[in-house]
Image: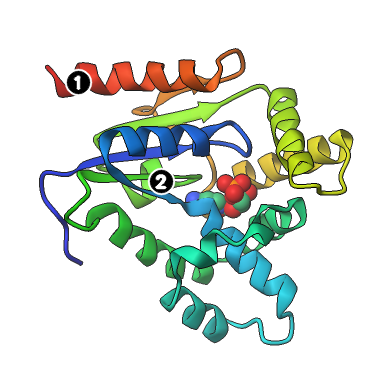
Amino acid sequence: MIKRKDIIKIAIDSPAAAGAGTLAKAISKHYNLLYLDTGKIYRYIGYLKLKFPKKFSYKFIKSKIKNLREKNLSNQNLVSDEVGTEASIISKNKNIRKLVHNFQLNFAYNPPKKFMGSCLDGRDITYKIVPDADFKFYITANIKIRAKRRYNELKKLKKDITYAEVLKSIKKRDKSDKSRKISPLKKTKDSLLINTTNLNKRACFLKIKKIIDNRINN
Ligand code: C5P
């Protein structure tokens, strides 16, 4: 694999709906980094399983990952709670993780020249995908706040779901993502904890920016 030297690599892990995606996007834009929401890849595979149950096989997923494009990951269908739940089921599969792993490595270590580096968020980024990242963050928030944020997001998209259903599903996903054997969600010792419960988007962004600027400028 080609690895670009002298790039900034940011790795972020977080439980569902903690605000990591919004933050990662803002940070990537500010520092001109290539951004990848790795959850979207697992969601895409979960979506394929729901949409093409008969075709769904290792070979099928492999061909889809090989031809994975930006437009596949911006598909609005990936946002639903049903797809999120399916993603958390298929993401326990070792072979599926391996396929996704290689795709992520390319993103992290070999971003196009126009970018200063890369920023990936997910569940196992800080210790499995980019263990040598220059900056590692574990972003979290109180579960009720996370459920409220996800509920509002889904309501904006006119999804037919209640707050109680969202809360239940996030709890289930947290449990599954943290307790699974392969690539569980965890905070590594070298990751900085950012709790977004009482912080708005701008405050979160400034907190992370301060940490990065302090290190870059010293
Ligand atoms: O981040 P998001 O909530 O979209 O992720 C959907 C699911 O994909 C997670 O609940 C998790 O099971 C899985 N995932 C993963 N590893 C990642 C990113 C997401 O297992 N790096």
Quarter of the image containing the N terminus? bottom left
Direction top: furthest residue: 198
Q: Position of residue 143 (x, y in %)?
A: 71, 27
What is the spatial separation of the Cα atoms under label 1 and label 2, in whole angstroms? 21 Å
Which badge, 1 or 2, is on the more N-terminal residue? 2
Name the one closer to the observer, 203 or 130. 203
Give the numbered dot on residue 215: 1
Q: Is residue 129 left or right of residue 121?
A: left
Name the one closer to the observer, 200 or 81. 200
| Mark 2 CB lies closer than 8 A to ligand 1 | yes
Kind of residue sitting beneath label 1: Arg
Q: Is residue 80 above or below residue 26?
A: below
Residue at the location (50% across, 71% down)?
95
Kind of residue sitting beneath label 2: Ile
Q: Position of residue 204 (x, y in %)?
A: 47, 20
Residue at the location (17% across, 64% down)?
2
Element at badge 2? helix
Give the numbered dot on residue 125: 2
Viewer-side label of 1, 2: 1
